[in-house]
């Protein structure tokens, strides 16, 4: 072991990494995933891996619940309860209570619902404060909603987190933030920023897309008002798996969301012609749930609950620190620059490096079986999903990165051509 002068983190030798895998209390979880041979998967922050049980659930839902049960399965196979039952399980992962989370729709759609509900709770205030480098869909949704409301509502964007102190004023209705930034992995202090919002009479809406299943989240301990999040990233729910919405119990009876579909009605099967919202979190449902995707997503959610966010976070921090040290040691002098916060407390479960030729480098890495991804401008993202990423994997990934940089293997036309999804 040698100390990396720049980081203060230790550069772990291959045999030490192997020992860490042997001692890892989460090591057994890797067996629960069906991972392809020869791939080091460092993109679980974009699409989580396939839990083996997901395949069994899919087959059961198709062959038994759908084929045999047909319409009866809404009651008998528990389809009707899925959004609330899985919502309760997700609640346990993000510091919410049972009855405060539902699984439904996409993150974008849920953000529309909770943001609209929050705005209605703050009449007379017209500003939504957020960050310019928030995930674009969050800003687009806020923009679209502000235009729809059409009462002079506007988005006020800041360029650095300290500017939030200035931007949250008495005209602010909602402070809308993503807890962990998708590009550089920087993590906000949820409790402190929620306090800032509340001090000025505003509400706090949090996006947990890169937090749920990656870091410890305490929505109620932070007094958060509303939140949304994603299940196809660190929760391993499957491509396009339904997202979730959180509304703190204290707001549920008095808040209204505008996508007032029949699944959010107090008694949908009465088929009343007038809308009357369900008393609790159910009012954040809109239409019929995507049963197949939702059923399959339970496999990943259960694995996370069993592993516990605390143990997952501890391993995530260790993996990220080891990776930073290895990359800065092996790849020194090749123009890589750490884009993520160096301090673990300020970082989620990903490490990003900046490089002028980042896109081509990531393509060349993929050819070597190391899968991360790329985000503009020049950001190589490596996500660490502690349920299936091993310490040995990050050692090998750092060496592959070194080889790509040292040989300039990335500098070829086929690596420079952009694909539709980066
Ligand atoms: C991934 C992500 C989303 C995804 O939204 P979809 O509606 O599922 O496409 C939204 N917000 C943030 C911050 C994300 O990281």
Image (cartoon, rainbow, N blue to C red):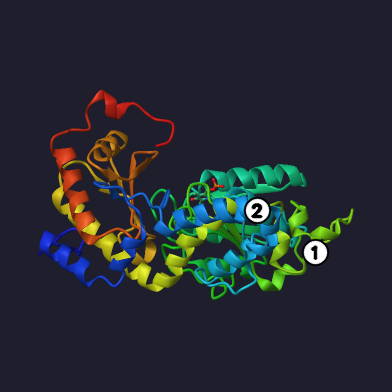
Question: Contact, CB < 8 Å: mark 1 with mark 2?
Answer: no
Residue 203 visible to the viewer: no
CA separation, marks 1 and 2?
A: 16 Å
Q: Front-most of 253 and 191?
A: 253
Q: Which residue is mark 1?
A: 266
Quadrant the N terminus occupies = bottom left
Mark 2 falls on what kind of element?
A: loop
Asked if residue 74 lies left or right of residue 209, the reply is: right
Give the residue at x 88% y 56%. Answer: 272
Residue 345 visible to the viewer: yes
Report x, y in % for residue 6: 18, 58
Report x, y in % for residue 253: 76, 69
Which of the two discs, 1 and 2, labels the residue nearer the N terminus?
1
Give the residue at x 89% y 53%. Answer: 273
Question: Residue 103: which quarter of the image?
Answer: bottom right
Quadrant the C terminus occupies = top left
Q: Which residue is mark 2?
A: 289
Q: Front-most of 196 and 68?
A: 68
Q: Is mark 2 within 8 Å of ligand 1?
A: no
Mark 1, other Cα within 10 Å: few <14 / some 14–19 / many ≥20? some
Outermost residue toward the top in this view: 413
Give the residue at x 48% y 63%. Answer: 301
Question: Residue 141: which quarter of the image?
Answer: top right
Q: Front-most of 209 and 80?
A: 80
Mark 1 falls on what kind of element?
A: loop
Asked if residue 317 lies left or right of residue 60, the reply is: left
Report x, y in % for residue 118: 69, 60
Mark 2, other Cα within 10 Å: few <14 / some 14–19 / many ≥20? some
Mark 1 vs mark 2: in front? 2
């Amino acid at each position: 072991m040698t100390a990396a002068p720049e980081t203060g983190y230790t550069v772990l030798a291959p045999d030490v990494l192997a020992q860490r895998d042997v001692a890892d209390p989460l090591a057994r979880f890797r067996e629960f995933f069906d991972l392809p041979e020869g791939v080091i998967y460092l993109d679980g922050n974009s699409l989580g891996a396939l839990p083996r049980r997901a395949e069994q659930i899919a087959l059961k839902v198709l062959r038994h619940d759908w084929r045999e049960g047909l319409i009866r399965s809404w009651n008998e196979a528990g389809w009707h309860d899925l959004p609330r039952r899985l919502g309760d399980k997700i609640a346990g992962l993000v510091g919410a209570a049972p009855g405060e989370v539902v699984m439904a729709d996409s993150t974008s759609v849920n953000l529309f619902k909770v943001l609209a509900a929050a705005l209605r709770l703050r009449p007379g205030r017209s500003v939504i404060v957020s960050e310019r480098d928030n995930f674009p869909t969050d800003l687009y949704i806020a923009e679209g909603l502000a235009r729809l409301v059409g009462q002079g509502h506007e988005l006020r964007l800041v360029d650095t987190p300290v500017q939030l102190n200035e931007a949250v004023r008495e005209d602010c209705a909602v402070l809308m933030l993503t807890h962990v930034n998708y590009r550089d992995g920087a993590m906000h202090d949820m409790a402190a920023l929620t306090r800032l919002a509340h001090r000025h009479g505003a509400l706090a809406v949090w996006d947990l897309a890169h937090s749920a299943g990656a870091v410890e989240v305490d929505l109620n301990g932070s007094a958060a008002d509303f939140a949304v999040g994603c299940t196809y990233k660190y929760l391993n729910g499957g491509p396009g798996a339904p997202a979730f919405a959180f509304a703190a119990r204290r707001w549920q009876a008095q808040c209204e969301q505008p996508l007032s579909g029949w699944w959010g009605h107090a008694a949908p099967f009465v088929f009343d012609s007038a809308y009357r919202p369900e008393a609790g979190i159910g009012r954040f449902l809109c239409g019929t749930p995507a049963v197949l995707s939702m059923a399959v997503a339970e496999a990943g959610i259960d694995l996370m609950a069993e592993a516990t966010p605390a143990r997952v976070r501890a391993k995530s921090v260790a993996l990220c620190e080891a990776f930073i040290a290895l990359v800065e040691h092996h790849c020194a002098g090749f123009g890589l620059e750490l884009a993520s916060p160096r301090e673990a407390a300020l970082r989620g479960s990903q490490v990003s490096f900046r490089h002028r030729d980042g896109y081509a480098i990531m393509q060349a890495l993929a050819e070597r079986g190391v899968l991360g991804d790329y985000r503009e401008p020049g950001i190589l993202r490596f996500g660490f999903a502690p349920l299936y990423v091993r310490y040995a994997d990050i050692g090998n990934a750092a060496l592959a990165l070194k080889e790509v940089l040292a040989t300039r293997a990335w500098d070829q036309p086929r690596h420079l051509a952009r694909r539709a999804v980066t």
